[in-house]
Amino acid sequence: MSRLTKGIGVMVALDMPDIESALHICDIIEHATGKFCVKVGRPLEMVGGESTIREICESTRLPVIYDGKIADVPHVATAIARAALGAGAAGVIVHGFCGSDVLRAAMELSMGDVICVVEMSHPGGQEFYGGASEELAKMAGELDVDGVVLPATHPERIRTLSNHLPEHTYIISPGVGAQGGTAGMAIANGAHWEVVGRAITLSDDPLSSAEGHYKACIAAHRNAGVP
Ligand code: FNU
């Protein structure tokens, strides 16, 4: 299990409900020029559960993040995280709104990265988070989680919320492409990994789409002069 570094890079979201397509995309991304990792989402996990995560992890050299968006009481949350990390995932995504004991329990496993969802990218993500995401970011920073999720659809929120995080915490940012976020904008505002799913996986040419997104991230990082 190798942990995720700070990027700059593109995290390709694997949300297709079949392993063959997921492995095909992994193979393409492995040969892409740039820094990449992949994320196994629930639709893919539903195919075969833990053994699907294991198969992806064993078939690719790319770091694999399990996006279970775990939201449960600590003993159940840790059982899910343990299964995914035991199957070879480098990290797991855990909801912040369930509270610090859930995140702490996942971190105490010491089996891989814990990435806390602080604010979501979809339109409904703006309905309830409001000031709560400031508190979630503070909690994530105080717990010293490895990474956080902040929305590429609202790059200004990345800038604001990252003020509550230690310098070494990495920010992954979904919402690029299909959800309306512009490639590179999250990076320009302080993110380290842009999460891109359908804009790459459903593209006619996933390789050039992935490389194009990566180039946009690097250009944005260079132009913004962010650390
Ligand atoms: P695409 N994702 C998200 N928003 O989209 N983990 C969040 O706030 C969040 C996520 C994931 O739209 C989503 O589950 F916390 O096709 C999907 O896997 O680019 C990916 O990011 C976005 O996929």
Image (cartoon, helix red, strand yellow):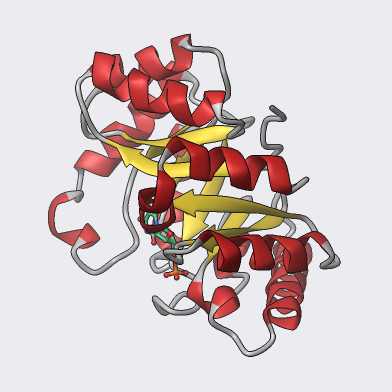
Residue 138 picture quarter:
top left
Instruction: Name the foreground residue: 222 vs 172.
Output: 172
Instruction: Name the foreground residue: 35 vs 169.
Output: 35
Q: Residue 60, image x and y in percent?
A: 73, 48
Q: Is residue 137 above or below residue 160?
A: above
Q: Residue 159, image x and y in percent?
A: 48, 53
Residue 91 picture quarter:
top right
Q: Which residue is drawn at 34% across and 62% down?
A: 121
Residue 186 visible here: yes
Residue 191 visible here: no
Ligand 1 falls in quadrant: bottom left
Instruction: Name the foreground residue: 79 vs 130.
Output: 79
Residue 76 picture quarter:
top left
Q: Residue 180, image x and y in percent?
A: 42, 79
Instruction: Name the foreground residue: 71 vs 88.
Output: 88
Q: In this view, does 25 lie above or below 112?
A: below
Q: Left or right: 12 with respect to 138?
A: right
Query: Split into 4 quadrants, where in the image is the N terminus?
Result: top right
Which residue lies most toward the top here?
108
Q: In this view, does 63 lie above or below 12?
A: above
Q: In this view, does 111 lie above or below 128?
A: above
Q: Residue 194, image x and y in percent?
A: 58, 60
Q: How many marks?
A: 0
Q: Which residue is drawn at 67% across and 67% down?
A: 24
Which residue lies most toward the bottom here?
204
Q: Which residue is drawn at 30% across and 24% down?
A: 77
Q: Residue at x 59, y 64 (%)?
A: 20
